Image (spheres, rainbow, N blue to C red):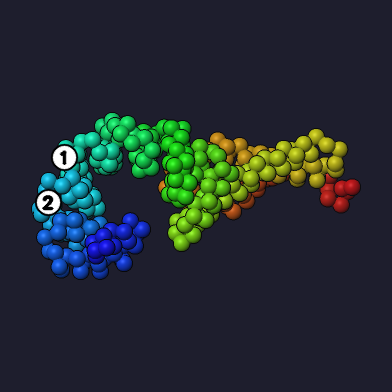
Amino acid sequence: MTDLERARELWKLDREADALPLVVRHLAAEPESAAGWRLLANCQSVLGGRDEALAAARRGFHLDPEEPWSHWTLSDVEALHGRTAEAVDLSRSGLRLWPQFWYGHTHLARRLLLADQATEARRHIARALELEPEMVWSHTVLAEIEEYDGDAASAIAQWRQVLALEPDNADAMQRLSSLQLRTGRVGTALSGFTTAAGLEPEDPLHALHVSWGLRLLLNRLYYVTTALAGVLGTLWLFSEVDQPARLLVGGLGLAGVATAAHRTHRGLPRGAKAQLAMFVRRGQSLFRTWVATRGMAVVVVALAVLPRLPPIWEWH
């Protein structure tokens, strides 16, 4: 096996750091190898050498402009540099060279989606799935298109299809769980986040999502408990318990009902950024809100009824 072949196998295993020296050695021996320059660009893109990746991709493109992979590799690096229009054009030109290849349609669909051209992206991904119905990347891009269009139910179905084809896909599990969280299925989402964290324990993002889902679950349980306690406390207003205790517990109960109703009215914000922002706000204001809502209810009840109560030493 040649250096280039070994490097390519390592790159497929996401071992770009191990592949890079082999690619460099290959190019030292064969500086006109377009495939070598393309692989160097792919490795440098992952390892953070964006300028080196761009130079290598351009070199590979000029050495073999009739090879579709030269176009797609340069398109990826251009996108990495934020040049979306150039990335789309290169993806199109690569597809023109190989119009019956599923990868070319999926690649162009992804580039179009990132350029906010979801309608055309949907046409290309449909063609990709006609050519190869069970390619994970094609279903992944279709799920992203459904998310972009705001169709949560279709996106969830597509992410499930991705997981049916590749059960160990931690990213798909995380994306599916995020959608489930946004649609109110907190317990299911938390289970999915936990599974994703188990698949990729070294990725701190999955641990963050687990804590995020757990926080929302506890938050929901808190407000359900508050509502139930509030209802029970309010019923004390009509019980046979001594008047002062009845008023105090009833006031707290009314405050609990008000807090739960207020939280239900607000609902859960949509989207990951809104959820994380909510956590920050809740962390800053939860105690103040708890004291204010209950305190106000107690004060209102006290101002209304205390003047009518007998002196405290006569309570029994």
Residue where numbered disc 2 is placed: 64
Q: Which residue occupies 55% across, 39% down?
A: 185
Q: Quick check: marks 1 and 2 in contact, CB under 8 Å?
A: no
- Is residue 160 at least partly visible in the picture? yes
Answer above or below: position of 283 versus 114. Answer: below
Nearer to us in this view, 258 or 27? 27
Q: Which residue occupies 20% across, 69% down?
A: 25
Residue where numbered disc 1 is placed: 97
Answer above or below: position of 154 versus 202. Answer: above
Nearer to us in this view, 175 or 241? 175
- Within-10-Å neighbours for mark 2: few <14, some 14–19, many 20+: some
**Of callouts 1 and 2, which one flags the residue occurring earlier in the amino acid sequence?**
2
Image-based side of 314 in relation to 195, left or right:
right
Q: In the rendering, at what x and y percent does residue 3 appear?
A: 24, 65
Amino acid beneath label 1: Leu
Q: In the rendering, at what x and y percent does residue 256 appear?
A: 67, 42
Image-based side of 193 in relation to 59, left or right:
right
Amino acid beneath label 2: Asp
As drawn, the label of residue 214 is none
Instruction: Determine which quarter of the picture holds residue 238.
Output: top right
- Within-10-Å neighbours for mark 1: few <14, some 14–19, many 20+: some
Nearer to us in this view, 235 or 226? 226
Q: Element under label 2?
A: loop
Q: Which residue occupies 14% across, 64% down?
A: 30
In the image, farthest residue toward the front: 1
Q: Which residue occupies 49% across, 55% down?
A: 199
